[in-house]
Amino acid sequence: MKKALLVLLAAACALSVQAKIITKSVEYKQGDTTLEGYLAYDDAVSGTRPGVLIVHQWLGLTDYEKHRAEMLAQLGYVAFCADIYGKGNRPKGVEEAGPLATKYKSDRTLLRARVNAGLEALKQNELVDAKRIAAIGYCFGGTTVLELARSGADIAGVVSFHGGLDSPTPADGKNIKCKVLCCHGADDPFESADDLTAFEKEMRDAKVDWRLIMYGGAVHSFTQPNPGFVNPGAQYNERADKRSWNDLKSFFAEIF
């Protein structure tokens, strides 16, 4: 009976400190442009903790990235979704998303400025240990976090999920200070063999601590149930999604 009471007491204590995920929109700026990100953290965790910057895919900041932020908050991180396009600038479909994504991919200086603004907003959060920060991104966002690394950002690591690996300035690989993980669909038709080869050469030449994991049977957008358009080359793959998330958790356990 005594043991049973102790078990019940322990369970009650556990319930009293159950995770409560706090979420809120956060405005910040890059130059004169107002941006609106999304913050998520567990208020049951005390003290500072690692921060994770999340960069959206080409449709802009959506519920998808917000859900990923909440998943990371449940793991004990402070997660912040960056806004590359600007407050209120949310594409309604691929017709609007395409030109926007192209604008930033064609101007890597502006892309780096936008993502670094998000990084600074995350660093300024009082719950974040500024020495333990990583950035992750999906598709367009995967390209963006690689550009963040190429900009010389002082962070622990970046993770690209089915992001474009190409670089107009491969020599910038020498600026990378952090570890790099790329989670890539082995059958992604949107990434050319030449771009893959060039990325690997960039990483080797710059002596980056990097890894490229290929998921068999996975194409583009394999972590996204709704990639925003219908194409056999961009489809959700539950197995690759789960495996890549586990690979992210292992990577974070290493860098943090």
Image (cartoon, rainbow, N blue to C red):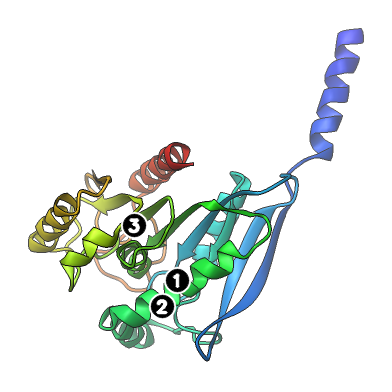
Q: Is residue 171 left or right of residue 133?
A: left
Q: Quick one: label 3, few (<14), some, or many (20+) residues within 10 Å? A: many
Residue drawn at (31%, 60%), measured in percent from left and top?
A: 235
The answer to whether residue 12 is above or below residue 115 is above
Tell me where residue 205 appears, x and y as whole percent: 14, 53
In which quarter of the view is residue 24 placed? bottom right
Q: Is residue 28 left or right of residue 234?
A: right
Type of the residue with mark 3: Ser
Say left or right for 14 vs 183: right
Q: Residue at x 45, y 84 (%)?
A: 92
Q: Rounded to the nearest whole Å, what is the CA distance between mark 1 and mark 2?
A: 5 Å
- The mark nearer the N terminus, 3 or 2, is 2
Element under disc 2 = helix
Q: Are marks 1 and 2 in contact (CB under 8 Å)?
A: yes
Q: Where is the N terminus found, in terms of image quarters?
A: top right
Q: Quadrant of residue 187?
A: bottom left
Q: Which residue is mark 3?
A: 160
Identity of the amino acid at label 1?
A: Asn
Circle 1 residue? 116
x, y percent for residue 133: 50, 53
Residue 102 x, y percent position in the rendering:
28, 83
Instruction: Please report the residue visible at 24 percent of the width from the left and 53 percent of the height from the top.
Output: 185
Q: Is residue 241 visible?
A: yes
Of 4 and 198, nearer the camera is 198
Considering the numbered disc 3 on the image, is that residue within a helix, a strand or a loop? strand
Amino acid type, callout 2: Ala
The residue identified by callout 2 is 113
How dense is the environment of label 2, judged by Cα within 10 Å: few (below 14), some, or many (20 and up)?
A: some
Verify CB contact (< 8 Å) between mark 3 and mark 2.
no
User: What is the spatial separation of the Cα atoms under label 3 and label 2, in whole angstroms?
Assistant: 18 Å
- Specify the label residue 233 is tagged with: none
